Amino acid sequence: MKFNKVLKNLSTYEAGKPIELVVREYGIDPKEVVKLASNENPYGTSPKVVAKIESLAKNMYLYPDDSMFELKEALANKFDLESKNVIIGSGSDQILEFCIHAKCKKKSNVLMAKTTFAMYEIYSKQVGANVIKTESSQHNLKELSKLYKKHGADVIFLCIPNNPLGECLDKDEVYEFLKTIDKNTLVVVDGAYQEYASFKDEKKRICPKDLISKFPNAIYLGTFSKAYALGGMRVGYGLAQPEIISTFYKIRAPFNITTLSLAAAIEALKDEDFVKECIAKNFIEMKRYEEYASKKGFEYIPSYTNFITILFKDFVSKTVAQKLLERGMIVRDLTGYGLNAIRVTIGTNDQNTKLFKLLDEVLEGLK
Ligand SMILES: *Cc1c(COP(=O)(O)O)cnc(C)c1O
């Protein structure tokens, strides 16, 4: 069958491997498998949210409230915005897709850092847009500016902080950059890990209200999948000026998140203490990774997220990840991103202890 030509050279997004796969392929007890591959909150979902969902399970036969009134109000309230500034997606991934579909067609230019969230490129290429990347792996605004001056762009993606590397631009430098961007270029500020970055360093904090008031061509994306511990519920949001939001509504399918997802997100916003506690623990545990890497002489990228990227010289990351997998430890190999590195989600204290032990064992065996 002939398909749309743009799909020919498009690779399929490789998601973090699920626990079920390790159980199936290596016969490991599911209780023994540790997943540190998709940057989920390792402390699990807030008990209050779990209780709410259990009480609502009987409602699944009903379509959700498609206006998503309560969730949009809660988000508007949290960010001191209005409902008309908010759109909800099936993960913020779906909103990334809206961004591309609203702005791009064949031969549009889309600008991004060389090593950043893979879906930016995939959505762009789906519509035949040209993807233009910086030479540097990490975000480099000077290079992005140069490319913008040379090629222009319909969409620019900034991942703040960046997945899969963990580095983070300062708010001030982002604003300086935005001042030089044409009002017809949509700038996507992907804040999937902003809760972590702004906890670690106030200079990194992006206030969505301030961002979209100063730069009406910017959209801020947030997700419930990471710090809010709802990866399995698929809820994300976009915050922008009404002109952008109302246009995205023309692309959105009705009922794009579920009745239970909607309730979970609303409930999660009521338990910010839980989120704060998890973030604080994340950075305590992160220190252990930094110490581990330093002790072993591995280079790592200082991270503003809930994961850390460790670079190898004398080992092949793909082999290391595979050997860990066979022992029931799932991490992310970054070979596909052109790096000899693994990305590890910061787990709980016990999970991290187990990772260090297994990694020692694997590396010893590879010497
Ligand atoms: C996880 C992630 C997302 C979106 O996740 P959803 O589960 O679709 O909300 C977006 N951007 C980055 C950089 C991410 O890491």
Image (cartoon, rainbow, N blue to C red):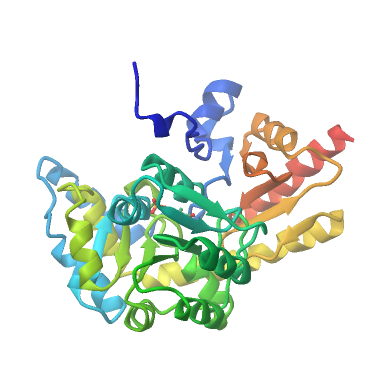
Describe residue 266's horizontal placement relative to residue 349 as left or right: left
- Out of 89 and 74, give the one closest to the viewer: 89
342, above or below 162, in the image: above
Rendered residue at 79%/57% (across/down):
299
- Out of 221 and 109, give the one closest to the viewer: 109
- Which quarter shows the N terminus? top left
Measured as percent of width and height from the top left, residue 270 is found at 29, 70
Measured as percent of width and height from the top left, residue 286 is found at 66, 63
Measured as percent of width and height from the top left, residue 271 is found at 34, 69
Describe residue 191's horizontal placement relative to residue 258 as left or right: right
In the image, farthest residue toward the top: 1
104, above or below 222, in the image: above
- Which quarter shows the C terminus? top right
In the image, farthest residue toward the front: 150
- Out of 36 and 6, give the one closest to the viewer: 6
Number of marks drawn: 0
